[in-house]
Amino acid sequence: MTGPGDREREDAAQGAAAPSGGFRKGAFGVSGSGDTSGFGGLVRVEPGGAVALHSTERPYGGYFDEVTDALVEAVGEETYAAAVPRVLVDRGEITYFVVREHLPVLLQALRDDEALRFELLSSLSGVDYLESGGPEVTPGRPRLHVAYHLTSMTYRRRIRLEVAVTAEDPHVPSATGVYPTADWQERETFDMFGIVFDGHPALTRILMPDDWDGFPQRKDYPLGGVPVEYHDATIPPPDTRRAYR
Amino acid sequence: MTATQDPYAGSRETTEGRVYTVTGGDWDQTFGQDLTGEERLVVNMGPQHPSTHGVLRLILDLEGETVTKARVTIGYLHTGIEKNTEYRNWTQGTTFVTRMDYLAPLYNEAGYCMAVEKLLGIEIPQRAATIRVLVMEINRIASHLVGLATGGMELGALTAMTNGFRERELCLDLLEEITGLRMNHAYIRPGGLAQDLPPGAVEHIREWLEIMPKRLAEYHRMLTGQPIWQRRLKDVGYLDVTGCVALGVTGPVLRAAGLPWDLRKVDPYLGYETYDFEVPTADTSDAWGRYLVRMAEMSESLKIVAQALDRLEPGPVMVEDKKIAWPAQLSLGADGMGNSLEHVQHIMAGSMESLIHHFKLVTEGFRVPAGQVYVPLESPRGELGYHVVSDGSTRPWRVHVRDPSFVNLQATAAMSEGGMIADVIAAIASIDPVMGGVDR
């Protein structure tokens, strides 16, 4: 779907130097010296960009190594290598990036294995990374991510799994068979991001009306939707108003 | 009378027009029918219903008064707060998230700010952490009192409602004095607090600490021993530990099932490990146990508030880093909260650099390094989790709130199917969902 947000981004892409991969330069999105505050010299990294594309090397530190070893033992080395292409440890949290086909096997093992015991699926939600895919990622890249925050009440540990799919093929196996609490959370993620959870008992919209068009929390869905006309003057949606980028 | 006429409303033509004679059914015929067959009745309850704890819609399949199926429909209070935060800077996010679970606004603010601080990699000053604990525990009592008050009202105990709101108002008076607002405070900010405790607040909290134990004892005298209250709650809305964990239910509901799972103890934050308090549990797994747990938690929160007051040391309530901290500590003026007069004089007449700095930080905001964090904390209703993603800019890339009301409400069907329709009300009241948090 196209919206006013697209125009803003296109303008930004044409006006400034095209973002080189996962990097964006300058505080105001300008190239050159439009800014003298000292903020302008910063080079920052986009999510899913250079930083997030690398994999943390072992040892991960803390209990992360124990969890990883137990997981490898539970599902087998071959399956683990195929299922988890990379692992990221950042800010004291560990993220396993999971290939979607292997997700049910991993979840089952994480819940049931005695050395893992992640009984509680704390949170399941989506993130749309849109264009910040990083330098190596081609069109049709997996921009829609599903984040699973698992909690082990036995060992008092927390980990995150992340599955990435494309907007063209947004299918992820449902976690409801292993964690019944995923029911509404998957419905919300479907409602907001259009991610289809295969095997969910009744995947319908939950927060938006049943006949709603589009997926509101995708990044190309504008905030505020249509412009409002009032006394012959139009008020643009909030995301197209003047703002710092 | 002809055969085509309605047997219960026969008519005849008169000079005045047609006259109907309406009669009742014949009891002989009525009793002749078989009434023992299955009778399925679908009842829609809500969303505008005084007993559904907010704009919650229930679709109940009934057989007689027994609920055979309970379906829950939500979304009537969806306001797109998560999406909105992506279009405001990091500090402004506080004013959005505080409106989600409107009975526990300070928990929303604290969870959001802790996530932002974790992304920034900063530590807040000790005084700010202590005041956060202080206001959050006052907020917990206020929230539990509303849960008790509205739950009581829904079960017909109107005195519980009037008394509950009376005591809650005492809590809100304190929060108003400290933050400037009764609800939706925007008091906790990334990096610390909007302002320090005003003069006199500590004394008023101490006075409140004297009053509250007596008032809580009144609730025990009024409700705990009361046979009607007990019979409405005991064995109602049963959900054991296995059911709770499978459905993701946390908070008082899980603790009433016997598991002492409280994030303040098992995963401490803001120095909760240094406070002396108990985690109340019950082993009944029903609405009665949840009532007792909430009552006991209010007493424990009073203990934490007293300890927080004792350890308050003078000091800053915002991080030193001028690239993050709001340029001016806010102060309460005659027209509400705003930048202090000295600061306005300083930037308008004293220092141009300060004006530039103020302008940039207030309009553009500060940058947060790219990455994602998940920060959980124990709200009055259970695990409140903030999954915050930054792309390195001045605005959040994504804020997802794992709201305990949203997850806990999934247990409605498990708690109420097979029971009486009147017990559905008690079961939902014992979950204590806040629809602002459910729908966000």
Image (spheres, coloured by chain):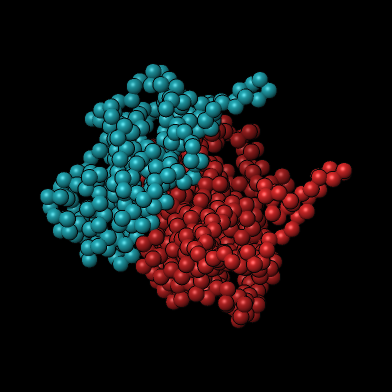
Can residue B306 be seen at all in this image of the molecule?
Answer: no
* Residue at image location 31% in from the left, 45% down from the top: A198
Image location (x, y in percent) of residue B307: 53, 70
* Residue at image location 63% in from the left, 55% down from the top: B49
Q: How many marks?
A: 0
Q: What colour denotes chain A?
A: cyan
Residue A218, by quadrant, is: top left
* Residue at image location 65% in from the left, 38% down from the top: B345
Can residue A229 be seen at all in this image of the molecule?
Answer: yes
Q: What colour denotes chain B?
A: red
Left or right: where A180 falls relative to B1: left
Q: Residue furthest top?
A: A14
Q: Is A98 in front, or is B415?
A: B415
Left or right: where B399 falls relative to A56: right
Image location (x, y in percent) of residue B331: 64, 48
Residue A236, by quadrant, is: top right
Q: Residue furthest left?
A: A78
Left or right: where B350 falls relative to A71: right
Q: Residue furthest right?
A: B15
Using the image, determine if residue B12 lies above or below residue B239.
above
* Residue at image location 39% in from the left, 66% down from the top: B243
Q: Is B218 in front, or is A23?
A: B218
Using the image, determine if residue B253 lies above or below residue B437.
below
Q: Is A60 in front, or is B158?
A: B158
Image location (x, y in percent) of residue A127: 37, 41
Image location (x, y in percent) of residue B135: 56, 60
